[in-house]
Image (cartoon, helix red, strand yellow):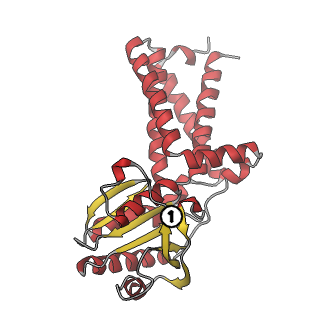
Amino acid sequence: MPDWLFDIADIALTLFLVYVAVFAIRDRRTLWVMRGFLLLMIADKAAEIYQFEYAAALLDKLLLISAVAIALVYQTQLKRLLEKLGQGKIMELLRPVEARNTNSENTVLDRIVESVKELSQSRTGALILIETTAIPIDKKGIAQPGVPIDAEVSKELLQSIFYDKNPLHDGAILIRDSRVVAAKVFFHLSEKSGFRQLGTRHLAARSITEQAENCVCVVVSEETGSISLADRGNLNRPLTSNELKELLSEYFTTGDRESVTPSLGDLGRRLKSQGEDLLKFLRQLNLPFTNKD
């Protein structure tokens, strides 16, 4: 068998593994990370083919560092991936995330952002935990599950919960599938030294998004009224209501999720099309492994 076929098979297998990882983590930003990692791999391969020794050595180190960083950041999701592989449940990893109604999601998003805007203007402290996919968050970061609510998200409901005379205003509310699931939810706080200078709400938001997958947390400061969004332990602040809506829309848009987790049929067609285009491109470059002779 020609050597170039082995190279094409290697590239196809790499693309497949990257897609499996994206399916397992199910997050739009993960797609960007995987694309960056894949570009590093392609650059490393190109440097090796053209015998750029120093560039290849540098890219090898970058790939190693990137792999370790990805393993640290996505350790919960990678654990789930390994568990499913060990149980032989590969098809569960490739099952698309359940689609949700885009118009309904946008309406809920508007309600959340509008309520956060008014809470910010009145300097009413708030902590809103939002699940970003149909997969429930990991409960290990939750200290107290809170008081069950199970009500449709509305601006009036959110404002009344965080009203300082309401006994439910302490802690966070949990939003799942466009509904307020619970209020007065408390989280295990991180012991990282870098988090200690934060207020309790910001500390809780960073802690839960660092420990639990598939969620973001909106924070309104009681002292300044500033708006923040925690994602994977990172805190984006201060935000305007428009900036908050733009960031949240990445998680609430069905189209974005479908682009991350397409069906198996779409995946096969994309891989075939991308493979054919890649093969044509490589032949035009007249690389050694594309020579059939």
Where residue 243 sits: x, y (%)?
A: 29, 65
Where residue 202 sits: x, y (%)?
A: 35, 63
In the rendered structure, the answer to whether residue 200 lies left or right of residue 105 reads: left
Q: Is residue 250 visible in the rendered structure shown here? A: yes
Where residue 261 sits, quadrant-wise, is bottom right
Q: Quickly name the residue at label 1.
A: 132
Q: Is residue 195 above or below residue 103?
A: above
In the rendered structure, the answer to whether residue 127 lies left or right of residue 67 reads: left
Where residue 84 sits: x, y (%)?
A: 71, 48
- Residue drawn at x 36%, y 88% as measured from the top left: 165
Label 1: few (<14), some (14–19) or many (≥20) C-alpha neighbours in 10 Å: many
- Residue drawn at x 42%, y 63% as measured from the top left: 204
Where residue 219 sits, quadrant-wise, is bottom left
Q: Is residue 151 above or below residue 254?
A: below
Q: Quadrant of the C terminus?
A: top right
Under circle 1, the secondary element is: loop
- Residue drawn at x 75%, y 49% as measured from the top left: 89
Where residue 49 sits: x, y (%)?
A: 48, 15
Indicate the amino acid at tag 1. Answer: Thr
In the rendered structure, the answer to whether residue 247 lies left or right of residue 4 reads: left
**Residue, far right:** 88
Q: Nearer the viewer, residue 183 or 197?
A: 197
Q: Nearer the viewer, residue 109 or 148?
A: 148
- Residue drawn at x 23%, y 79% as measured from the top left: 121
Q: Quadrant of the N terminus?
A: top right
